[in-house]
Image (cartoon, rainbow, N blue to C red):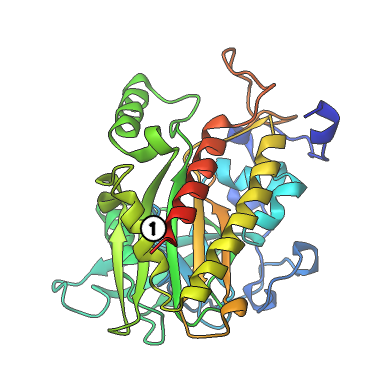
Amino acid sequence: MSSNQEDYNTPSHDDVHNLPTSKDRHIVDLETLPTTPTKLASIVVNDDNDMIDAVPFSDQVGGHSPCARLKDNPNVVCKPSGDRELAFYQQHLPPVLKEFLPEFFGVKLVRIHAQPKQSMDDSLGIDECALSSPKKNEVEQALIKHDENANGDCSWFEHCLERHLVKGNLKNTECILLENLTLHMNKPCIMDLKMGTRTYKDDASDKKRIRAIQKAEETTTSSLGLRVCGLKLFNCDTNMYTFEDKYKGRELTPETIKDTFHRFLQSNSNASSRKFIVDKMLSRIDELRAVIASLHRFRFYSSSLLLMFDASPSDPEHVHADLRMIDFANTFCYVDGGDALPGDLDISKPDEGYLFGLDSLVTLLQSSIVD
């Protein structure tokens, strides 16, 4: 691709490490957020709201931090985020990639604090959780409660929350506000894939680099360019969900992962619907591949690709199915105002590890519908 094709408007700014502090940024008024996807320009930005009610995001199947969704506006998911991911959404996101990401609604400073329950047999496994946001001399508070109407349980949310607490992460946390991609699905089935053959940052220490390379070689990251990091399956016979985490995904091989994809699609009991789901995803992958191949100045290290579809019975040709890119904490943008270009990186080529993963995904999806 020529450099002119990649010259989109990127506002110049300081290095990501010198971004304005949270208190200098706008706070999105959550009451004005849309209940259906919309453009960011139509959202009013201020800091006058007093209370945010949120519930655990039951469709979270991967990640390191607990995500929540707004109780009164289920279209919005709050995800803790660092400067690099925020800079990607606010400054560097290529317009051609937007349709493959959840809608971005803004950023809010929050503070998560909670106490795990003693018994893991309880419905959520946690006591009341508060998600609060310092606002000058006042404190916004919101209770995260177990959502009895949620699709499935909140097992990975619970894992992330307890990990968050064990690490003592009770400091103010910046959250990005994103579109809830499963909002209109009655029985959402979700697969979280960590894409690419490389998962470490440019500035990773030797220890982290060696560990990441070793993990890649021990899993399907190296052999397929993708790794299953979370799975939420619906069993049509029992009318119940099952969940598989990233630790299960690390055990998969290029052979056993085929069964995982097969089981994922079997969540929809209709063979015609399964074929429609696969065909739709293959079409989206083809479009995404063309876009990634055109972005020579981006490396999407350790980002995820969500595969989603609705397992509810419906017209086979109207099944809700989609895929979206998420998690850009390790994404590097070698553009104006972005990251320094490593001397050993050839920007005449795109992110070939990600493209390899997409090609493997095509093969896995095609083989999964062969009964």
Q: Residue at x 44, y 65 (%)?
A: 190
Farthest residue to the right: give it: 4
145 lies left or right of 354: left
Where is residue 153 shown, x and y percent of the image? 32, 75
Q: Is residue 166 visible?
A: yes
Q: For this view, does 52 lie left or right of residue 127?
A: right
Q: Secondary structure at mark 1?
A: helix
The amino acid sitting under disc 1 is Phe
Q: Which residue is at a point 60% across and 47% down the rendered structure image?
A: 86
Q: Position of residue 341 (x, y in %)?
A: 63, 20
- Tell which of 150 and 357 is nearer to you: 357
Q: Residues within 10 Å of mark 1 (few under 14, many from 20)?
A: many
Residue shown at 30%/45% (left/top)?
A: 255
Image position of 46 (left or right of 120): right
Coordinates of residue 103 in the picture (x, y in percent)? 66, 62
Q: Which residue is mark 1?
A: 261
